[in-house]
Image (spheres, grey):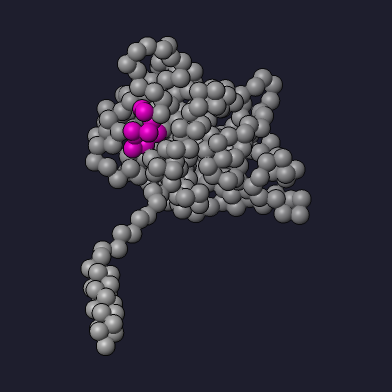
Amino acid sequence: MRTLLLSLLFLLAVIKYSYGQTKVVTTSPTKTVFAYGGDLNKDFLKYVIGLTQKSNPKICFLPTAGADNPYVINYWYELCLNFPVKPSVQKMFVNSSPGQKSFAEHLLDMDAIVVGGGNTLNMMGIWRAQGIDTVLQKAYEKGIVLAGGSAGSLCWFTSGLSDSRPEKLSIVECLGFIKASHCPHFSSEKSRKPLYLESIRKKEIPAGYACDDLAGMLFQNGKLVKAVTLDKTNNVYFISEKDGKIDEQKLVTELIK
């Protein structure tokens, strides 16, 4: 009898303890990429700010594709004057000196990172040499908003076409956060669209998303959740191959301007 009573008391204690515990539910950060077809402008910057869900977000500009062009950097700061943000720039063409933050310390402290346009192939080479590809992967996993246009949109995808070499467009392998190919400037550059379609038809690159200069795509956790545009003439497309033929689908866009 005594053993049974002790067992019941122990069971009641366990039940009481269990009910008294607060269950902790952990959720992974939302991995966000906002890619737009053209280069940086105030409307897309405003959209990026909104994605951070912060009242005064820290946003860093990566001008690597433009070789850290000082005029582009000045333009970035001019754009940011119109918004409640804490802007910064991470240059890649730097000299070592004591007291500097590392690339990782700077970038992983941001609420958003915006990548500028220029030479995609050179940018990817520099990033890989400097370990920026690894830092951006950590930023993506951390939930820092990643954004950009032109080279700054192409970089997040598996691959795409870039005007990074003389003579003709070439295929460039990118970060692969979005498992699809990509083509910026889809309607504005005449040579880009037919070559992108042909590359997909020949299965040289995977199916993917094409974007006009004033349109953009919001991806969360690797999936397209919204296509947006600044006017009614710029669009987003999904391009795939079926039975050796191209299937070009114009996606529904939301006007954000």
Position of residue 68 relative to residue 3, above or below, is: above
Judge by depth and name the residue closer to the eye, 141 or 193. 141
Q: Does residue 48 appear to the left or right of 15 in the view shown?
A: right
- Name which quarter of the figure residue 57 lies in: top left
The residue nearer to you, when weighing 105 against 228, is 105
Is residue 106 highlighted in magenta? yes
Q: Is residue 2 above or below residue 231?
A: below
Percent position of residue 197, x then y: 68, 42
Residue that protrudes farthest toward the bottom in the picture: 1
Along the viewing direction, whichever of 156 and 10 lies nearer the viewer: 10
Q: Is residue 238 visible?
A: yes
**Residue 64 rendering spot, x and y as whole percentages:** 48, 23
Where, quadrant-wise, is the C terminus in this rendering? top left
Does residue 190 belong to the magenta stretch? no
Question: Can you name the residue that lies furthest to the front here?
Answer: 2
Residue name at image x 66 percent, y 38 percent: 196
Does the image show residue 194? no
**Residue 9 point in image, percent of width and height:** 24, 78
Number of disc labels: 0
Residue drawn at (62%, 34%) of the image: 173
Does residue 230 lie above or below 247 as drawn?
A: above
Q: Which residues are magenta?
A: 105-113
Residue 138 lies, in percent from the top left, at: 44, 38
Q: What residue do we see at 59% from left, 40% from top?
A: 158
Identify the image quadrant of the N terminus: bottom left
Question: Quadrant of the rendered structure where residue 48 is?
Answer: top left
State left or right for residue 72 relative to residue 241: left
Residue at position x 40%, y 42% in the image: 142
